[in-house]
Image: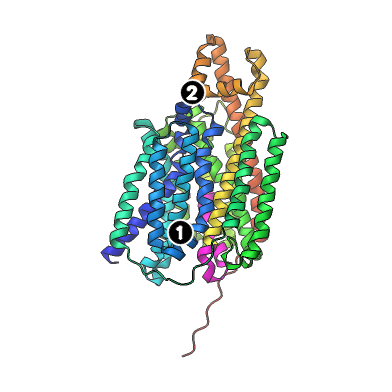
Amino acid sequence: MQRGTAMALFAMGLGVLVIANDFTALNVALPAIEEDFDADVGTVQWTVNAYALTFGMVLVTGGRLADMFGRRKVFFIGTAIFAGFSLLGALAPDAGTLIAMRVGMGVGGGLMWPAILGMTFAAVPADRAAFAGGLILGVAGLGNALGPLIGGLLTDELSWRAIFYLNLPVAAFAVAVTWAKVHQPHDEGARERIDYAGIVSLSLGLVLLLLALDQSADWGLTDPRVLAMVAAAGLAIAAFALIEPRMGKAALVPSDVISNRGFVAACLTVLFLSAVFFSAILYGPQLMEKILGYTALEAGVGMLPMLGMFGAVAFLSDRLVARVGLRAVIVAGTALLALGPLLLSFFGADSDYLALVPGLLATGIGAGLFYPTITTAAVTMLDPSQSSLAGGITYMFQVAGGAIGLGLTTAIFTIRSEDEIASEANALGLRDTAEQSGVIHGILAGTEPGERAFSEFGTSTADRVLEVVKESFVAGVQLSFRVVAAIAVLGLLVAVLGVRPEPPEPQSPEPA
């Protein structure tokens, strides 16, 4: 491999690393963000959801823009947006501003990712395509695994804001190397339309659904405002279904793709199973920091059984496929992903770290088996000319499923934990209000109102309050994980019944 090509691939790898790192690095820093902004976990989890959801929505559009205007140009624009909003995120004065900046980072990342994929595959000969794909997926897995470690180290030694500052030099180096070493011709062919109506309707539907889930914790599941948002989300998604057939080849999800039952089953499986991964990387560090008393760095290390196994197994998944077949590996991965959150749900307020390990291992191994193989299955179910589109749509379902799952589990967590506190409120001499429950939960995060409320209790009452807060927190997480496990079982059923990838037919030799 020529030195220039190697440098180009290195630059592309750095771009992937910084995008993937930002999916997981902030999870271990959420308690610190809660403390700084006197916010609750239901609010700060939007720093994760906002990034993931926006990234997923922009992804397919980013691929089309890269094909239309040139991958290199779109990569530079996306990186500038990503870095600019990273800087603004590091300077955010409150949780609302930080969430808005994460939306901007999601836009930048969604433009960068498909451009990086295109430039990477174009940089190597056709017979090295598997190497290029493995490089990108491997670096993405590495970024996910390193995220909690990097985020924990920076949070403990500097500040959670340093996670955002780190993006700036890495992005600048990737741009500089790409500018110097990547010079690929751009096909100035016919420019396709962008499915703006599809993008807006689908994005609006998902955002309204997430807002409804978020507000249901405060207003109640049957509140007219929550029901109105759910209804509006349903109408927006229905509009998306009506818009897509009219857009032809420019559709976000073309009709010939959505009519492929095997591909739809693969995407639905991804949608159901992604709630597991996102919930585990949110609540795993929360349990370690708030219940076990770990630092952010210790929580990052504590996530290695899951994220380390995810990366290691993903690299080996192709060998398992060669031995037992694609479908067997997919089913095994989905089964382990359903088992993982169930095992995690048995963690109690008096448990130690070892109680988390079986669930983390099952989730990590399951994800390592599932994601590479379901992506391969989805891509091979469509015509080879649609491979990039298939990969983008599959990843969009992964991110959307994770964001919706995270919104659902956070709503369940909040309602369950506040119910637990309310049931003990009278015995503790506390007012049974949502505001009071939020203040009491702030004790675990170290928010100023929480610390102030805790200091007002006598010694015996304070000990009981802390015990109740931990029990209510764990009860919320337990129920959330069990709901996620049930959703994952639905994904397992879809995989077993609907995902039946066919081995590629051998090509007949061309006539002499």
SS assignment for the magenta stretch, majority: helix
Establish if 10 lies above or below 219: below
Tell me the number on the disc at residue 114: 1
Establish if 116 lies above or below 363: below
Of 229 and 51, the residue lying toward us: 229
Tell me the number on the disc at residue 447: 2
Does the magenta segment cover residue 461? Answer: no
Q: Secondary structure at mark 1?
A: helix
Does the magenta segment cover residue 369? Answer: yes
Residue type, numbered disc 1: Pro
Of 171 and 224, the residue lying toward us: 224
Residue type, numbered disc 2: Thr
Question: Is 125 on the left or on the right of 240, as rendered?
Answer: left
| Position of residue 152 measured from the top left corner of the image (x, y, whole percent) | 40, 35
Of 136 and 182, the residue lying toward us: 182
Question: Is 4 on the left or on the right of 297, as rendered?
Answer: left
